[in-house]
């Protein structure tokens, strides 16, 4: 008789959607089983092929669909204040420029964020993260970038880490000091980039608060030359990079990101063929953000067909932020990705699991595979397409983070 495989938890009667890159994204295992030990998967596959098991705990999924826990790989979840009043003003006809001149826009979020303590940022942001958790999210990326000074950026990153501990979520922290130019550096963007590179970045990295470095490469953000300097500094500290690129215009930021082997380039509505080719060659993931596209009433679609043809991995995320995508539903982001960007169901599901993991530089989440964390979402749906098809609703039956 074969020795039992060591495990502490087994999920039975599960219809598994493994989401491994080796399998078709929509390949279902109808009578599946998952076994885990110490929060990691030791078996995931057909029940008929499972080894002998003797777990301390057996959980019956009742024939429900089980996917990897969802991954939101691009958010600005931590911030102070609200921009709902600005939204109302825009609906009444106010321009972005008029709102900004009146002290609104990112400056208003910066001021509210700077004024908030770490504890206040956690308290304000926890409900947003709780909404994501309630829809099956087990990993979330959270960026800084609304403090735009060392102390406030530190508070944002510390709050992000605290939120993960508070809600039982894996948090990947991204330093986005090069998000916008703070008012005290008006007209001195190079000086501000110096501050980011020489003061903020090494200090926060030394405190262990940074998992990756991001920047906003755009006419209203920072130039490719400035981003290049920042990325050189990040790589010197052995920190991976990613980039807000080609959202409003084509500055060739995606190609720059690819040269630095960036984890991802995000937005990409104005991405050209050269940028696609560079991303394909470097393995840089394309993270699409349909919430911002919808909210900003954009008309230039990201080149999905070109990305698909080049074999660039496509991820989807909420881009949760107060100004351009106040979205906390990754399920709705999938529906938007399908309806607005014409992604397939399989592409949407991969975009919030295995491909989103790659956009964070992670190989231990996003798929039901041996050795990965047992991050699972159990769904009350008849078929995977329902996760993309529904607009609203709450199909989650249960969520497990690291087996618990």
Image (cartoon, grey):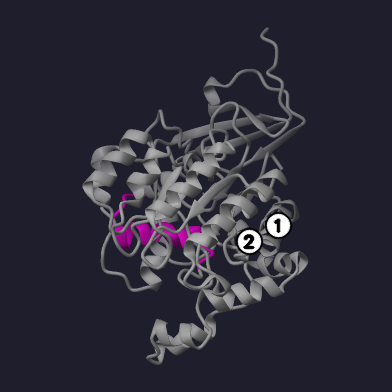
Q: Position of residue 144 (x, y in %)?
A: 60, 59
State the residue in front, 404 or 221.
221
Q: Can residue 395 be seen in this view?
A: no
Query: Which residue is denoted by mark 1 in the rendering?
Result: 163
Give the crowd class for mark 1: few <14, some 14-19, many >=20 residues within 10 Å: many
Q: Position of residue 130 (x, y in %)?
A: 65, 62
Residue 56 visible in the picture: yes
Q: In which quarter of the image is the C terminus?
A: top right
- Name the residue at the top extreme: 1
**Is 315 in front, or is 181?**
181
Are circles 1 and 2 on residues that touch, CB within 8 Å?
Answer: yes
Q: In this view, does 9 lie above or below 133?
A: above
Would residue 59 appear left or right of 64 to someone viewing this image?
right
The percent position of residue 79, horizontal first and vertical second, equals 62, 68
Q: How crowded is mark 2: few (under 14 residues within 10 Å), some or many (20 or more)?
A: many
* Residue lying at 57% horizontally and 79% vertically, measured from the top left: 108
The secondary element bearing badge 1 is classed as helix
Residue 330 falls inside the magenta stretch: yes
Q: What stretch is highlighted in magenta?
A: 327-345
Q: Position of residue 396 (x, y in %)?
A: 57, 55
Is residue 368 on the magenta stretch? no
The residue positioned 61% from the left and 59% from the top of the image is: 134
Earlier in the chain: of badge 1 and badge 2, it is: 2
Labelled disc at residue 129:
2
Q: In which quarter of the image is the N terminus?
A: top right
Between the C-alphas of marks 1 and 2, the distance is 8 Å
| Residue at image coords 45%, 71% | 324
Comparing marks 1 and 2, which lies closer to the viewer? 1
């Amino acid at each position: 008789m074969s020795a039992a495989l060591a495990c502490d938890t087994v999920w039975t009667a599960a219809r598994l959607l493994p989401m491994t890159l080796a399998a078709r994204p929509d390949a279902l295992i109808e009578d599946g089983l998952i076994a885990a030990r110490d929060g990691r998967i030791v078996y995931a596959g057909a029940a008929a092929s499972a080894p002998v098991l003797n777990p301390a705990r057996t959980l019956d999924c009742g024939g429900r669909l089980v996917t990897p826990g969802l991954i939101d790989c691009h958010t600005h979840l931590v911030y102070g204040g609200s921009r709902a009043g600005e939204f109302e003003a825009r609906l009444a006809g106010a321009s972005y420029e008029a709102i900004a001149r009146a002290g609104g826009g990112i400056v208003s979020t910066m001021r509210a964020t700077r004024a908030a303590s770490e504890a206040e940022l956690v308290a304000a942001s926890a409900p947003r993260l709780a909404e994501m958790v309630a829809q099956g999210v087990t990993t979330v990326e959270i960026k800084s970038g609304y403090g735009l000074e060392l102390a406030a950026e530190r508070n944002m990153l510390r709050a992000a880490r605290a939120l993960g501990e508070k809600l039982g979520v894996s948090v990947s922290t991204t330093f986005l000091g090069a998000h916008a130019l703070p008012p005290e550096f008006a007209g001195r963007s190079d000086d501000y980039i110096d501050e980011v590179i020489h003061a903020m970045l090494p200090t926060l990295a030394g405190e262990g608060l940074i998992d990756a470095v991001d920047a906003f490469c755009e006419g209203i953000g920072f130039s490719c030359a400035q981003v290049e300097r920042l990325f050189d500094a990040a790589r010197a500290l052995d920190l991976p990079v990613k980039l807000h690129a080609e959202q409003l215009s084509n500055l060739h930021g995606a190609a720059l990101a690819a040269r630095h082997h960036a984890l991802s380039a995000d937005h990409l509505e104005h991405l050209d063929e050269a940028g696609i080719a560079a991303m394909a060659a470097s393995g840089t993931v394309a993270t699409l953000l349909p919430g911002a596209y919808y909210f900003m009433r954009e008309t230039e679609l990201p080149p999905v067909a070109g990305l698909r043809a080049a074999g660039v991995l496509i991820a989807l995320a909420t881009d949760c932020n107060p100004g351009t995508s106040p979205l906390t539903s990754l399920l709705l982001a999938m529906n938007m990705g399908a309806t607005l960007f014409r992604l397939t169901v399989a592409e949407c599901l991969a975009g919030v699991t295995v491909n989103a993991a790659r956009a964070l530089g992670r190989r231990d989440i996003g798929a039901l595979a041996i050795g990965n964390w047992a991050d699972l979402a159990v769904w009350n749906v008849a078929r995977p397409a329902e996760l993309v098809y529904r607009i609203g609703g709450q199909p989650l039956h249960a969520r497990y983070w690291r087996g618990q």
